[in-house]
Structures are given as C-alpha cells and as structure tokens.
Amino acid sequence: MTGRPRPLPPELPYTVFTATEARRAGISASRLRASDLRSLSHDLWARTDGTVTERDIVAALCRRDRHVFAVGLTAARLWGFPLPGSLGREVVAAPSSPRRVGGRRVYKPGGRAVDTRIHMGTSGTLRRESALVHWSRLSVDRVRLGEEPGVRLTSRIRTLLDLAGILGQDDLVIIGDHLVRMPRPALEGRADPHASVEELAEIAARFRGRGAITVREAMAQARVSSDSPAETRLRLAVVRAGLPEPLVNVRAVVNSGERREPIDLGEPDLHWPRWRVALEHEGPRHLRAEQLPRDIARAERREKAGWIEVRTTAGDLGTGCRRGVARVRDALLRHGWQPS
C-alpha cells in the first residue's frame, strides 16, 4: 500500500482492536499492514496515532471473548494498586523475547523471575500464550471496571490474594493499607474504603493458596490511615526496629500556655504524642510552591509546642528505612523514650 492510508471506518473506534473486529469493519489484511497500524500480538492491532494503554489491550481481549478477564498484576494495575518498582508500570508491549526449551518457544521467564506479561484469566478454553499475554484457566468471580462493559477483572480482594505468591510481605501490607484507608471525598469521589481491616484479616485467614501465610501476616499489620506506600514502609520499619507504634494521619491537638488553649498541630504522617515527636515524609506534593509556606508554618507551630518534627525523604527509605528509623529513634530518645 502506497500513499496515505485511507481512514479507518467509524465502526472501529478503538485504539487497540482484534483482527476479528477489523474484518467485521471491512478492513482487509493488506490495510492492516499500513503505516498507521502496528501488530501488538497474535490477533491484536493498535493505531500508531494514539497512546496505547494496558487497559486498551485488556478491553480488546475482553471484547473478543466474554469469558476472559484481567488477573494478577494486570488487574492490580487496573485497580490502581501501589505496586513496587517496575511491577507498577503498564505493560503495552512484549516485555522480552521467547526462549527455546526442548525445541519449543517458552514465554514465561526462567527461575523465580516474575512473569511481567499482561495476565489474563478465562473460565473457558485456554487461550494461546504469546510474548505479550499470559493465560490462566480460573473459576472465580469477576467484576466490571468502571462503566465500560468490555473491561472485566478480578475483584480488588481476589486480586490481592493472587499477589500473595508474587509480592513480599511489606508490599502486601502497603496494598492492604491502600484498600482500608479512609478516602478524601473531595479528591477521590468516594466516602468509603474499599475494604475493612476486619474483612481483609478474615479473608486472608481463609485463604489456602500460594503465599497464604505471607498474606495472613501482612493483613494483620494493615492499618486504616496510611496515605502512601512511604508512610506504610516507615511505620513497619520503626515497629520492626523495636520503637513504639505511631499514630498515622491522626490530628494532633495539644494544650499550651496558661489558659491551656488548644493548638492544632495538623495531621502528621506519623506521630508519637506521648513523646511529642512527629514525622512528615516529603513526597512530591510537598514540592509544590503553594505547599511550602503551609509546611513551614506547621513546623513552627510544632516547635513552639515543644515537639520535634522529623522530615524524611526518599533517601531515608533505603535499606529497610534504616536512616529514617535512626532519626526517629534519636528524636524519641531526646524526649524521654526508653527502650524496654
């Protein structure tokens, strides 16, 4: 085909579509080879003039077969779970080339490496493996994502359980905290958490799949108020180091002066009211110009009330939050805490 390709018909409005959808829309095999289209995988095509998302790919697979749905890491990304490192990045292309085992192509990575392809499940006939998509046969409940009838995936809690054999305990606690945290209605459009601490503990106790012990121990450490993975990691690290467990995102109000008037010290990320120590983790939000004056005023109020404010950054989270823990320990000792 030469020259500019003719426009695709309006019957094919998707960024990613299947070869079957293309044929139904009257697209020939030669038209699929035009410069404005590219092959993603067996039977999957994408427009080159738009940004392809993992959700687009899952939607195309779900439209093709009503028995399929996203599972595992793919479902976790679609739900917006806070996943560690590269596991949180969308998969929109085959992550690696196949390898040869016994004369046949194998797409699953060797050893204990995590399979980073798109993860899909089916209650029907098992689909053909590809460099882009891994398939499992599962008989589990699935739900619809948002208002799109074509996007199906496992429920949030089922997705959490499916990650139990992949993620470490702290990473599972982070997801547990994400599910049970109280949302901010003005920012998130919802007033209720996705689950309760009791619900997660009960479901984890009944789970008998891979990683059952890990997820059970992780859900026992889930707390309602963590707003970010960094806060959860710091909370877990200080408790593991033998320091007192902090309050998390709870408003601190103290009485000061002769009239004992209350002073609002805000909602520290973590704080220990008995020892007048607060911790604030400096994430991206604190780098905004409008946030800096508020942070300074808050720190001054706490100092005036006799509190120590520990401010951590990403550098304090390495090696099990060792530096952050050391700074908290120093502040607690300065205000009278004594190790037992």
Image (cartoon, helix red, strand yellow):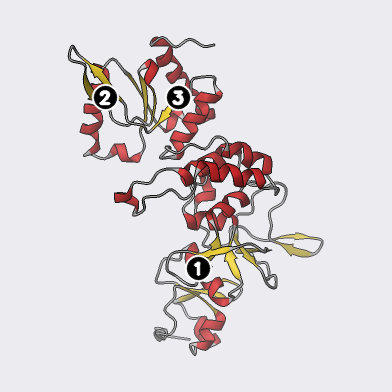
Q: Residue furthest right?
A: 102
Q: Please tell me the numbered disc located at residue 69.
A: none
Which residue is disc 1 drawn over?
Answer: 151
Toward the viewer: 172 or 40?
172
Query: How far apart are the two marked residues, 1 and 3, measured between alpha carbons?
Result: 41 Å
- Mark 1 vs mark 3: give the one in front: 1
Is there any visible trace of residue 39 in the rendered image?
no
**Residue type at tag 2:** Ala
**Residue type at tag 3:** Gly
Q: Quadrant of the C terminus?
A: top right
Q: How many marks?
A: 3
Which residue is disc 2 drawn over?
Answer: 299
Q: Please tell me the numbered disc located at residue 324.
A: 3
Toward the viewer: 2 or 14?
14
Query: Horizontally, is 2 left or right of 305 in the view?
Result: right
Judge the density around disc 3: few (<14), some (14-19), many (≥20) Cα neighbours within 10 Å.
many
- Mark 2 vs mark 3: give the one in front: 2
Judge the density around disc 1: few (<14), some (14-19), many (≥20) Cα neighbours within 10 Å.
many
Q: Residue at x 24, y 34 (%)?
A: 292
Percent across and percent down for residue 303 are 26, 18
Q: Residue furthest bottom?
A: 26
- Closer to the N terminus: mark 2 or mark 3? 2
**Residue type at tag 1:** Val
Query: How far apart are the two marked residues, 1 and 2, measured between alpha carbons?
Result: 46 Å
Dot 1: element = loop
